[in-house]
Image (cartoon, rainbow, N blue to C red):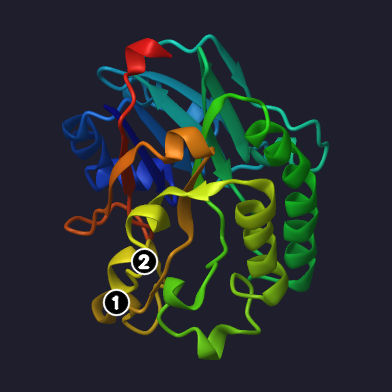
Amino acid sequence: MLRIINLNLNGIRSAWRKGVLPWLIEQRAEIVCLQELKAQHADLSEEMNAPPGFRAYYHCAAKKGYSGVGLWCRSEPDRVIDQLGSAEFDVEGRYLRADFGNLSVVSLYQPSGSSSEQRQEAKYRFMALIYPLLLELVTSGRDVVVGGDWNIAHRELDLKNWRSNRQNSGFLPEERAWISRLLDEAGWCDAFRQLHPTASDDSYTWWSNRGQAWAKNVGWRLDYQLATPAIAARAKRAAVFKEQRFSDHAPLTIDYDHDPGST
């Protein structure tokens, strides 16, 4: 079994204080994809750099307290790639890929456009940048899983208040159409939706800190694992963990019928 977990930490140091490390160790994941570290390498403790049982890799943002992605791997990767070839986005720490034989796992943190029109335009530029890369990956013949915070709710069942959010970042028609292109044209598979095609309330992975959104489960599904068809077909279990809160996001765990030793 190959267990992959992805989680936006909303600050690794904050999540650490909330007990994310013991929980992750208990899950026995093969690979953990982390987003929004909000830390630089100098801020990471010895334990963060060497979590028990894992090899840890991080791509931190140049800006302090901002963005950043990580991968924790049980096995040592054949190679790790942390560059998109973009002067604008490589300094933001939004992409980290590890290769294991024929398997590649990517931790992705797509920008949010909710803070300003300028950041929404940056989000569109990022989407335009990574689409051909994702197309290249899906046609590579490799088994690929991209686990991350996509900052887009794809369908109406992916957020509670979809009617009132139709003109808001994260549920804009252009954003939703971009996800549809990845799934319907490029050939990626939404591993969670493949297993739970109609789940709504149990599928949310992010809740605003305003208006008792968590208590009322007024959430959004922003965190996905997109997978190439062959490995997506071997997805056997998917779950969002909500019994303990480490962040404003919840961890997404997906188990694939895949022998990590065969990669």
SS of the residue under disc 1? loop
Residue occupying image coordinates x 45% and y 85%? 161
Total numbered labels placed on residues in the image? 2
Q: Position of residue 140 (x, y in %)?
A: 67, 26
Which residue lies under the disc numbered 2?
A: 204
> Along the horizontal axis of the image, is 219 left or right of 124?
left
Q: Residue 85: in sight, yes or no?
A: yes
Mark 2–mark 1 Cα distance, whole angstroms, equals: 8 Å
Which residue lies under the disc numbered 1?
A: 217
Residue occupying image coordinates x 29% and y 77%? 217
Q: Position of residue 68 (x, y in %)?
A: 56, 39
Nearer to us: label 2 or label 1: 2
SS of the residue under disc 2? loop
- Quadrant assignment, res 55: top left
Q: Is residue 109 above or below residue 259?
A: below
Q: Residue 36: in sight, yes or no?
A: no
Question: Does the CB distance between marks 2 and 1 fall below 8 Å?
Answer: yes
Residue occupying image coordinates x 64% and y 36%? 138
Q: Say which amino acid is labelled 2.
A: Tyr
Q: Position of residue 58 (x, y in %)?
A: 52, 27
Q: Is residue 97 above or below residue 199?
A: above
The mark nearer the N terminus, 2 or 1, is 2
- Quadrant assignment, res 215: bottom left
Q: Is residue 229 above or below residue 251?
A: above
Q: Residue furthest right?
A: 87
Q: Quadrant of the N terminus?
A: top left
Residue occupying image coordinates x 52% and y 68%? 153
